[in-house]
Image (tube, helix red, strand yellow):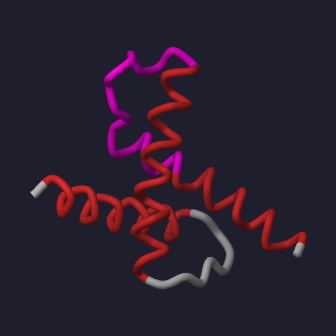
Amino acid sequence: MGILYTILIGLVVGLVARAIKPGDDSMGWLLTIALGIVGALVATYGGQALGIYRAGEGAGFFGSIVGAIIVLAVVGLIRKRS
């Protein structure tokens, strides 16, 4: 059940991040789920590095959205260069 929960939250976070960030972020369902999961990881480890979260403590929903927006911005920069 944990994997299904992670996929569901990843999908929701990815969809919200794509809706908030302006621009055309054309990607399928699988990439949207991956975006949400990677955004949560970025927020967790970035928050731990900044002292926002303690070790072993995960990022919350809003932190995950911010992490996903950061990932979207980086992917947009990489796509623009190639």
Q: Which residues are magenta?
A: 50-67
Q: Position of residue 63 (x, y in %)?
A: 44, 40
Q: Is residue 45 magenta?
A: no
| Location of residue 54 (image quadrant) | top left
- Residue under the image location 32 percent in, 25 percent down: 57
The relative height of residue 32 versus residue 7 in the rendered view (above or below) is: below
Q: Position of residue 35 (x, y in %)?
A: 49, 63
The residue sitting at the left extreme is: 1
**Is 23 displayed left or right of 50 in the figure?**
right
Q: Position of residue 46 (x, y in %)?
A: 56, 31
Q: Position of residue 36 (x, y in %)?
A: 43, 59
Count of marks placed on residues: 0
Q: Quadrant of the C terminus?
A: bottom right
**Is 80 displayed left or right of 28 in the figure?**
right
- Residue under the image location 55 percent in, 82 percent down: 27
**Is 34 displayed left or right of 11 in the figure?**
right
- Residue under the image location 41 percent in, 55 percent down: 37
The relative height of residue 59 versus residue 72 in the rendered view (above or below) is: above
The relative height of residue 16 versus residue 37 in the rendered view (above or below) is: below
**Is 68 displayed left or right of 14 in the figure?**
right
| Location of residue 74 (image quadrant) | bottom right
Q: Quadrant of the N terminus?
A: bottom left
- Residue under the image location 53 percent in, 42 percent down: 42
The relative height of residue 30 versus residue 59 in the rendered view (above or below) is: below
Q: Is residue 53 magenta?
A: yes
The residue sitting at the right extreme is: 81
